[in-house]
Amino acid sequence: MKKLRLLLVALALPFCGYSQFVFDVEIDPSFEPNTVVFPPSPLKNQILFIGGTDKVQTTETYGNAPGEALAKQWNDFIGFTPDNESSDLGWVSVNHERIISNDSIGDGGGMTVFKVKRDPITDLLEVVPQTLADGRSGEYFNVDFVNTVGETGMNCGGITSSVDGRIWTAEEWFRADNDALNDQVRNLDQFTISTDIPGDFDGATIEKFENFNYMVEIDPKEAVAIRKQYNWGRQPFEGGAIAADNKTVYMGADATPGIFSKFVADTPGDFTKGKLFAYKHDQSGEPWVEIANDKLEDMLNFTQIALSKGATMFNRLEWVTYHDGAVYMTETGRDNIGTRLKEGAALGGVLDDHWVAPLKKRFPEFADKTDEQLIDLVMGGSFNDYYGRVLKFDPATGKVTTYLEGGSFLEESPELADYPENHLSNPDGLNVMVVNGQAYMLICEDLNGTSNGRVPMGITNRTCEFYILDMSISAPNVDDLVRVSISPLGAEMTGVQPTPDGKTILLNSQHPSTDNPFPYNNSLTYAITGWDQAITAITGVKDQKDLVAGADEFIVFPNAVSRELELNKLVDIALYNAAGARVKVARNTKTVSVNDLATGAYIYRAFDEKTGKLHGGKIIIEEAK
Amino acid sequence: MKRRLILTITVAAFLGLASFNNYRFPAPIDSVITEISEAYLLNIETLKNSADTFQKSLDRASVTEQRKIFLALRKDYKKIEYLIAYIDPEFNKDYINGAPLPSLERKADDDITVLEPEGIQIIEELLFSDEYSENKEKISALSEQLSFNISKTLDFQKKVPFTHRYIFEAGRQEVIRIFTQNLAGFDSPSLEQVIEEQAIALRSVKEAILRYTPLLNKKAPQLTKELKRQFDGAINYLETNTDFEKFDRMYFLKNHINPIYASILDAQLKIGIETYYEAPPLYQKHAVNYYARNLFDPQFLNSNYYTRYPSDKDNKDVVSLGRALFFDPILSRNNKRSCASCHQPEKAFTDGKAKSTAFDFQGELKRNSPTLINAAYADRFFHDLRTDMLDDQIEHVIVDKSEFRNSFLNIFKTLEKSDEYVTLFKKGFPELGDEPINKYSVSASIAAYVASLSGFDSPFDKYVRDESEELSDEAIKGFNLFYGKAACGTCHFAPTFSGLVPPFYKESESEVLGVPADIGNTKLDNDFGRMNGVIKEGAHIYKHAFKTPTVRNAAATAPYMHNGVYTSLEQVVDFYNKGGGQGLGFDLPNQTLPPDPLELSDAESKSLVAFMESLTDLSSTKNAAPTRLPRFTDPVLNQRKIGGEY
């Protein structure tokens, strides 16, 4: 028995024997071999809006006079609406993902809008003071939901129209009764709908909680809500996208089962009238089943009706984005699928075969299983979908396929040396940025957990990463991701939104970087500017890496944008400060971040186990001008 | 064996090739990490086989036999505990050795989902229960899942690159875990072999650390010998004193746990292996101060970890500003109430009332005012756990209509009228420039002040740190009961004696106890607690759940429980002795406290109280209040009273 066991383990340990060099705690810093200069990042970070700290202009609410209030926090989605009529850049809309009562902003969730312009010399953004039609004047404005459509709740994701920047906010966290509003909404009387959407909606009376969980259009220019899209169904919405025809809206629901739905307007730009569909991959002909959308009761039960019509079930759809005729969306995954899919299937829901590939990748022992068997496995809840993925829907073929499978330790990638830099766990925020004519996918993680390598070993805190993917790569995998930043505990990044000129990415975070002088304990909306200059520097690193990968000598070069030192060999590396004291040790790696180091001179020692050689040199991290 | 030999030779060959002109070649590399990880992975494989053996026994063997096989499986788990709980703590907690209680699914945004427990502990609970035969099917399903999950984590962990740092950190965490949780019976519902298991767990740590002997011998041969002596002594003590109730935890802590905890650190530093402070990203905050050499070192936990204030800032000015704000009624709408209204230093930062007085004397607040000494060491605040940072807790007090009935905007407007305050804010927050008064600076300074109120110098602490011999036999007895028969230590974890969970100290727990509404224990208190706290935790498992508070300074913080129902520690002990709410006959199906009476004698109850009384350190209450408050130009404002009027 014992012998057999030993044998098993011996066979199963292909990765044992990592280089494990013990570096000196202190060295003599006088030695100065080849020096690598680490230039400052060409990107400029700036804070645009601080939740909980910046003041928003409010309307008359609950009998309180218009005035000022501290903005709500928990910034999530960011919408961007270009200004085509002046030299200003456009309006930024920020979601607040909470349900919390507030006397002047309004109960429930909320949104803050503001306008920005670009400084022609520095390229940095500036918030523009405005006076709105309702007389409010200032920099930041609270979007009035209370007096327009009733309160909103947990404003999570949303839609920025790819056509003209119209904005919808998504109310995600699904309410099942008024108690679930937790005393954070003061008026729990029944709600009477007032809307221009045709059907039996106008004048209908519903329970208060039933007025939550819609896509809600807002006017970012006047900071008011326009309408709740009762005709798109009541769903736990996270993301959505509007196609180039200005008629088709694609929407994702963050649930298991989550329905992928679309609304097609009768007339471009008029989203009050049109048809609603749920995706059903196995439908003959067009893969969409229509859901009649003129009755309130049907719209309140959208998910059940869609499932009963055999809709395809997804595992927590998050953001949806539209680019070049295709729809991309994040399926963030779920550790415990449990009986949810079974229950969905009992109503009529089906699974498509985009599950087959990830399952085969994760469980090599299932190689001989049929697709049906694998689908059954997912349906049975036995597949813990730890990492999630990015999906692609091609309207031309009607198929949803996996565009980028998440995870670490997949069979084909990433290689050990690239872990944890190259991995993808629980993708959430998603967008496409076009810079200099080239499309890049922007992906934000929002971890569901820390197990199974979703955070690097030896770290128990949740960390979330933000990646860029060059979309010209065909059949991309996690090795093709370029990490832009990694955020510390509690600082999940959301709302990734590029400006149309391809120069700036807008992001939300709780505290984006600890090296910032201002201590951030609030939700921040910040801008990273300079992508038109920097994009090739960051995505070109892969080419540079390939170039030096085969070299005999040990090569170190800086990646100024991602703030990482790139190494062409798998090494253990220690960094020492100018006084010779060891400050950092990284193991089994081909990259070392310098983001966490102050500017100045450092010495590195790198041990390459394969050759048994110890390399050394000096790095100078330059100060930004 | 053969494979290991080959590896060593190859490594040596590499060594021969190595050359570097100007460098003195540092310590030799070694196959140590390969040996440790191989042994560890082999032991996971063994655990997997044990789970299968147990699964098979369910159809064939007698209950007694099944239990025996299961206890052997537990021992196999203890062999790998130090590393599996380090390498993938979340997976281990979710699927291998988590509490036998339902939990909420993390980060599920569409709904609140209760997950049923999985893993060793729930199997043990069912297997050793009186209703075994009804549980049979469930046990079988759970053990099948366990076996599957062990094989899944093995697949994953085979690919994990182990490094030296992990071994030392995991070893030290296991030493903390053995003392603060395992020895209290935290993870073993049956308590069948708790003490023997710790010998096994510690032996695994010993074997891993002592593989570094060749490296350590080059730097500090004496330390190798010392380590070996300490490990053997501790293991021997555990193997020869196996009675759960009689085990002398105080002796074991002072003579074995603390010395080993220090020596593993010494070995790591002597060899030159990096600590987590050198592991990227460097800006990570760490809850445990890795350089602490004693579990009861006053600096064992890093208070900065628990607030949003950056850890690298010198915060003397911020603390003193926070102190002024804490005692200044200017924060309340009527300028009559301050933080100190309900957190009075002379009452150990409580108010001595069952429930605090509300604004304008309009009744009372919902719950009891807790002490602020050591309050910072938590990841959740309020009895219902509704905020997750001390900095955020303050906002609730400011806006609550029964507390300060104020708003931040109003506070800024008022504070800005005081040149003295503006100067103090500028000094504390130079990075904020000309507008230093904002929500962050107000909250952060009060939080920094509260975080400064630590008290780890009680007679008990001095005794366990060998700084004093003065601790009554009764208190020592009480400590042993607290961590043994009375089972207090399974929720009130050292060193804070609160629900802050070791060895990571990153999560605050709540418990459902069934606290009565009245001192006569006649009916359940109707406060739903945590269920009505955070919107995403509104689940029945948290109905009547409350944060597990610190027992430190309990002698000075009567009355007790979230509603202040009990006026003496004796009454509190009596409540637990009766098995909490269920023991009192209340209908409370989700109670997390075992309903069985503890069967403590009067003398034992008295000892427990004596131990709790030895946890008093009120040094932070001395001269706590400032002698004056910052001035305003408005003479009316200058008449405000330090600490408020009521």
Image (tube, rainbow, N blue to C red):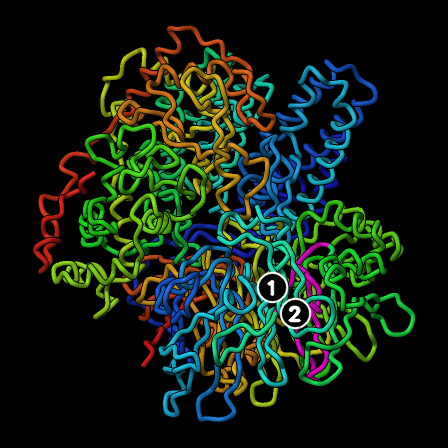
Q: Is residue A58 above or below residue B517?
A: below
What amino acid is labelled 1 in the image?
Asp
Give the mark nearer the N terminus: 1 vs 2: 2
Residue at x-position 74% and y-position 55%: A257
Q: Is residue A586 above or below residue B558?
A: below
Instruction: List the residue tagged with mark 2.
Output: A229
Front residue (pair B313, B78): B313
Secondary structure under badge 2?
A: loop
Q: Is residue B505 magenta?
A: no
Residue mark closest to the camera, 1 vs 2? 2
Front residue (pair A297, A423): A297
Proximity of marks 1 and 2: CB atoms separated by less than 8 Å: no
* Residue A477's disc number: none
Instruction: List the residue tagged with mark 1.
Output: A428
Q: Is residue A323 above or below residue A580?
A: below
Residue A555 x %, y %: 50, 73
Extreme-right residue of the structure:
A284
Snapshot quadrant of residue A278: bottom right
Q: Is residue A240 magenta?
A: yes
Q: What range is drawn magenta here?
A: A228-256
Q: Chain of mark 2?
A: A
